[in-house]
Amino acid sequence: MGAMNRPSDGLSPVVAVDRRLQTPLYQQLYSGYRSAILDGRLKPGQRLPSTRVVAQELQISRILAVLAFEQLVAEGYIVSRGSAGSYVSNELPDPPQPRGSHQRAAADRRPGPRRLPKSKLARIDAPWLGLRGPFRTNQPALDEFPAAIWARLVARHARRMSPRQMMYGDHLGLRSLRDALADHLATVRSVPCTSDQILIVAGSQQGLTIAAHALLAPGDAVWLEEPGYGGARDAFLLAGAHVVGVPVDRDGLDVAAGIRRAPNGRAVYVTPSHQYPLGVVMSAPRRLQLLEWARRRGAWVFEDDYDSEYRYDGQPLASLCGLDADARVIYVGTFSKVLFPALRVGYLVVPRDLVARLCRFREAVDVFPSTLHQAVLADFIEEGHFARHLRRMRVIYAERRNALKAALARELPSLRVMGEHTGMHLALMLPSGARDRGLAVRAAENGISVVPLSTCYSGRSKEAGLVLGYGSTHLNEIDGAVNKLKALVATQSGCTD
Ligand SMILES: Cc1ncc(COP(=O)(O)O)c(C=O)c1O
């Protein structure tokens, strides 16, 4: 058994004795331990607490605990190894599965669970998501992450941890991290903010969930890009919002279509710097039109800026937030793409008058994320490692992007590529009616992980395509994987010339 899986030694299971019962106390104790062993709460080989500890915990005489343990030894449930203590016998058969009827009866009495949004559930099961192969969309180049530097900073902070750092702290998040972020965002993303407008959260998923709950009432209409990001959809559905798909064209979200479909919208979610999944950049006129609509309507604009640090062609893009003169934009950022997703650190930048309201909700969710990683991240940014990492990764991703673009142009010249100027993914468009889901399943069988574009739509009218991530795809994998894709696409008549 690996060290990680070892059962905890010497802990007491929940066993109660009741002095009012006729059954002798030592027998109650014996029965309690026997049940815990039989139903698997105590595992074979697990060390038991000593009879002294058991007696103390239950406030009974030690002799009663000794009697109970002797009976368990006599019946073969536990073995005594003298001064090394008593252990659950390794010879016991596996504990029976919990009895279904008992479980079900208990479950039936529970109130009906709230229904989880469907989109996320579907995405978890999708065959293309479980793979580590080429073109996985949400994965940065983890093998290029400066792990040694990170480990040094973690060790530094773990050694230095003061009682103050181990206590509850600021609900907005660690001040040093917010200061570092405010400077970074103002310079790199034109997000005008000070650190007291930043809330550190456990990734953008949590940021969206907190903001949606804080700012929307159940039933409020929210415009969502169509096609769009399932994670955002889930967050708004969870807050009870009524989500309305609004089409995206070459200029980004079609604001006029949004006004037609849901003039009463209370909020809109957009990825203006690199639309997920099509990758288009929202044009300046559309940005201004959206902000003007939000101003007139008194609506909130959720700007998800998840991967725009990596821009390969053209001018760097300013955020939508930077254009907002009416304090309407809630800016959502994440370290999942620029560092690694398991870090679970993201941030919200919110208009000043919303800080207290959002803080109140964040307090109800998780108070604040782990201080240790916030402190590590603050140093990582302040000491220049973050800027260096971004510069290095931009070069690596640009090479991968170029290689992918070239391979697609060579092997699948009739298929249009979209959204390749920024980020870590692009969209390969298929003729309408092509069965992209089937293609993605067959690609997954061949070890290639592509997201079918049609699964990013919530409404009926869908375009077909494949979303290809290149962040974690090595240069030497790209040509082979594109060739495989070409062969699969060719099996779908009408996909290529
Ligand atoms: C559009 C979009 N936003 C945000 C994220 C990151 O989410 P999180 O910060 O919760 O890891 C992703 C990840 O795939 C994404 O595609």
Image (tube, rainbow, N blue to C red):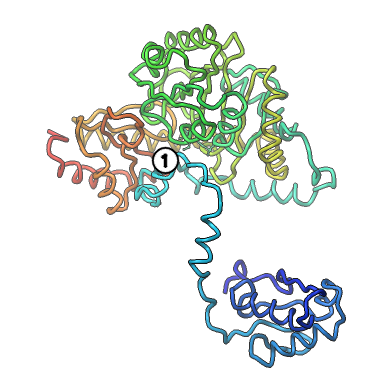
* Residue at the spot of label 1: 118
Say whether mark 1 is within 8 Å of ligand 1: no
Q: What residue is rendered at 50% in x and 61% in y?
A: 104
Residue 102 in the image: above or below residue 394: below
Pick the residue in front: 474 or 358: 358
Q: Quadrant of residue 496?
A: top left
Tell me residue 290's x, y (percent): 47, 12
State left or right for residue 464 relative to residue 333. Answer: left
For the image, the number of numbered tags is 1
Residue 361 in the image: above or below residue 104: above
Tell me residue 256's x, y (percent): 38, 11
Q: What residue is rendered at 76% in x and 76% in y?
A: 49
Residue 150 in the image: above or below residue 180: below
Tell me residue 459's x, y (percent): 33, 29
State left or right for residue 469 relative to residue 11. Answer: left
What is the quadrant of the C terminus in the image?
Answer: top left
Pick the residue in front: 238 or 85: 238
Tell me residue 283's x, y (percent): 41, 13
Q: Amino acid at mark 1?
A: Lys
What is the quadrant of the N terminus in the image?
Answer: bottom right
Pick the residue in front: 94 or 134: 94
Question: Within 10 Å of the Cα at label 1, are there few (<14), some (14-19), or many (20+) other Cα atoms?
Answer: few
Pick the residue in front: 150 or 214: 214
Residue 403 in the image: above or below residue 32: above
Mark 1 secondary-structure assignment = helix
Q: What residue is rendered at 53% in x and 79% in y?
A: 94
